[in-house]
Amino acid sequence: MNALRVCAIALLLAGATAAGPDVVVFPAGTTLPIRFLATITSGQIPVGARLRVQTMGSLVSDGCEVVPPYTQAVGVVTLSRGGRMFGGRGALRARFDSLEVGPHRWVAVTAVLDTLEYSSHKNLSDSGVAYGHHGSLAKRAVPVGLASVAGAAVVPVAVLGGYWLARPGGAARILAGEVGALRLTAPLGVAVGAGCRAAGPRWAPLTTAELPALPARTDTKEGKAQGDPINLVLLGSAMDLKGAFERAGWLSPLRGTVRTVTTEIVAGLDNQQAIAAPLSSQYLAGRRQDVAYELAGPNAKFRHHARFWQLDSTSPVWVGAATNDVGVTFNPFIGRFTHRIDPAIDDERDRIVQELEATGCADLINYLAVPGAVKQGRNHTGQRFVTDGRAAVIRLRPCEGPPTGLAGPP
């Protein structure tokens, strides 16, 4: 433990929150939002492998942004166990030891995983161990029951039953693009300069007069304003839009065909990811979305997605509606199953803001109240939504060079 860390701990124990004018101490228990840059699976990634994540928030002290957002943390895998027989679940743990606190500036840190987007509290321990799902007896017994109903002989049913009941449980898996948080398990001291970057909004004032007229929500094919609320305004070319989302790891959905829809259904039944699954159409002034992007979740039930329309072919202004699919439900309005969205659609809007800013290809200009916005309601499939009625205005720019922050600690 270096002298800086010893000094920081001593002052913290004495009740100090800042070690003099040049060192700020963040106590154990402080959390920092992160995003995973690659998929990792227990039993496949070896113990000792180095692991890199991107931070999605800042560390603030007394109104000063001590550690800016969109830096990195690096750690090492200390446990990687695949699923065990008879439904035993896999396990994965990493200890994070390095944090980027500024350009080419790294400090030692002691931290573990605190939350994961797709892991419930019971599947993530206080010590940062992520577990896979249990291979439940009910799920493993279903194929045996089906074989019995189909009239299979006793011996094949017994063999099949032994195979399915002995199958291992799920591995622990963290997806590329999955968000979560780190938790400090020891105090962190960060040296700061004389200047202070004030925490809080960094955007300049903006009014609706500086933009074309914004629609409040999308339409149905018949022109009825019953779709999702408009909550994104992007300024830039089609190539800028494509480059920013692709660098963030989002993909364009595949066209809906018998093959792609069948693939999505099979993925849903098998509890697998549905990469670039087809996306239903919404309309604006009778026009289907020009482009759309999505980020797949752990299975076909979950995905983040946004649809965009260019307001005018001569103007680089795109309006979008972003929502987050969190399940599947039967929809009596259309007589079929459909994805269920998270009603708090502002969370999806803000996630996209962060993910595009993190690429280095976009900057948030401001949040803007949309004229005529419906703050509570349902879309054309009957999905309930709640919003503050604002759209995030984002300026895009060409993505040049490698993604920001790929250099590791010295």
Image (cartoon, rainbow, N blue to C red):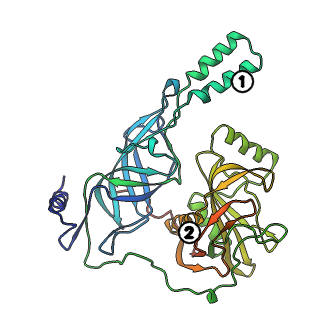
* Residue drawn at x 48%, y 36% as measured from the top left: 44
Q: Nearer the viewer, residue 257 or 115?
A: 115
Q: Mark 1, residues whose alpha carbon is within 10 Å: few (<14), some, or many (≥20)?
A: few
On the image, which quarter does residue 342 sit in? bottom right
Q: Nearer the viewer, residue 52 or 127?
A: 127
In this figure, which residue is indicated by the disc labeled 2?
Answer: 399
Q: Measuring from the top left, give residue 194's x and y in whole percent.
A: 25, 78
Q: Is residue 397 left or right of residue 58?
A: right
Residue type highlighted by circle 2: Cys
Vertically, is 375 above or below 121? Answer: below
Which residue occupies the extreme bottom position in the image? Answer: 209
Q: Nearer the viewer, residue 162 or 353?
A: 162
Q: Is residue 267 left or right of residue 179?
A: right
Q: Measuring from the top left, give residue 312's x and y in whole percent.
A: 74, 80
Which residue occupies the extreme right position in the image? Answer: 222
On the image, which quarter does residue 273 sit in? top right
Task: Tell me, for residue 127, which label it has, or none.
Answer: none
* SS state under label 2: loop
* Residue drawn at x 62%, y 24% as measured from the top left: 141
Q: CA distance from mark 2 to mark 1?
A: 52 Å
Q: Measuring from the top left, give residue 388's x and y in whole percent.
A: 57, 73
Vertically, is 154 above or below 355? Answer: above
Q: Earlier in the sequence, mark 2 or mark 1?
A: 1
Vertically, is 108 above or below 352? Answer: above
Closer to the observer: label 2 or label 1? 1
In this figure, which residue is indicated by the disc labeled 1?
Answer: 146
Q: Measuring from the top left, give residue 169's x and y in whole percent.
A: 52, 30
Residue type highlighted by circle 1: Leu
* Residue drawn at x 35%, y 54% as measured from the top left: 183
* SS state under label 1: helix
Vertically, is 270 above or below 158? Answer: below
Quarter holding the C terminus?
bottom left
